Amino acid sequence: MAKVRLDVLIGGFADEASLKQHGTARYRPNIVLIRTDDLVIIVDPGTVEKQSDIVDALKVRGVNVSDITHVIHTHHHLDHNRNSGMFADVPVVDAWAMWNGVDYDTNPKSLHELIRIQPTPGHTYDSLTIFVTTEEGGVAICGDVFWWKGDTQSDVYATDVDELVKSRALVLAQSDFVIPGHGPKFKTK
Ligand SMILES: [Zn+2]
């Protein structure tokens, strides 16, 4: 039986209170590592204090930068994709396609039987969610469809609030746990 191992490599936060105090808000996304027998996928290698934090977090889990086989972007906001270039020559997946070098495959085959990628627009028009079947249940890595647990407010960055409401319902219905864009993993059921 195939198995998937899922780790939040670096935990996310969104510190907008800092805007008042220091003049700048601070954002870091959940950066997630998905491992199968033959895939090592990094999701949202975005903003960190320094790039070596990602290298170090991988090392702690016995993974080198060169071991990464795919990068997936939940959406195109810079705080989620700032460090994609660290993983130079591997295929990169977004809501549009899989890029492999200059090849742009709009109909990529599924990466793995236990990893499903589905468009969940609303926060941005190109948002996607990665549904991963793990031993503890279904986990949805949804980017900023939910910023954190209890994120049911209207999202000021949303490109389409109606779509966002639909996407949030879909993510909750199809998962046991959610890894949101910027807060700790939470249980849905
Ligand atoms: Zn975002």
Image: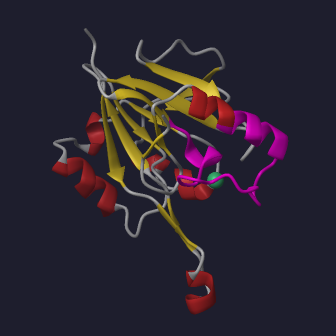
- Image coordinates of residue 99 in percent, x first then y, are 56, 28
Residue at the spot 71% in from the left edge and 38% down from the top edge: 126
User: Is residue 155 located in the magenta-colored stretch of the structure?
Assistant: yes
- Image coordinates of residue 55 in percent, x first then y, are 28, 54
Residue at the spot 53% in from the left edge and 52% down from the top edge: 149
Q: Is residue 94 visible?
A: no
Residue numbers of the magenta segment: 141-168
Q: Between residues 188 and 63, which one lies in front from this camera angle?
A: 188
22, above or below 29, in the image: below
Q: Is residue 3 left or right of residue 138?
A: left
Residue at the spot 60% in from the left edge and 56% down from the top edge: 78
115, above or below 33, in the image: above
Q: Residue 139 falls in which quadrant of the image?
A: top left
- Image coordinates of residue 12 in percent, x first then y, are 45, 59
Coloring applied to the structure: secondary structure
Q: Residue 23 falls in which quadrant of the image?
A: bottom right
Q: Between residues 184 and 109, which one lies in front from this camera angle?
A: 184
Q: Is residue 103 left or right of residue 158?
A: left
User: Is residue 5 located in the magenta-colored stretch of the structure?
Assistant: no
124, above or below 111, in the image: below
Residue extending furthest toward the front = 189
Q: Is residue 186 visible?
A: yes
Residue extending furthest toward the bottom = 21
Question: In which quadrant of the rendered image does the N terminus lie?
Answer: top left
Residue at the spot 32% in from the left edge and 24% down from the top edge: 39
183, above or below 96, in the image: below
- Image coordinates of residue 141 in percent, x first then y, are 49, 38
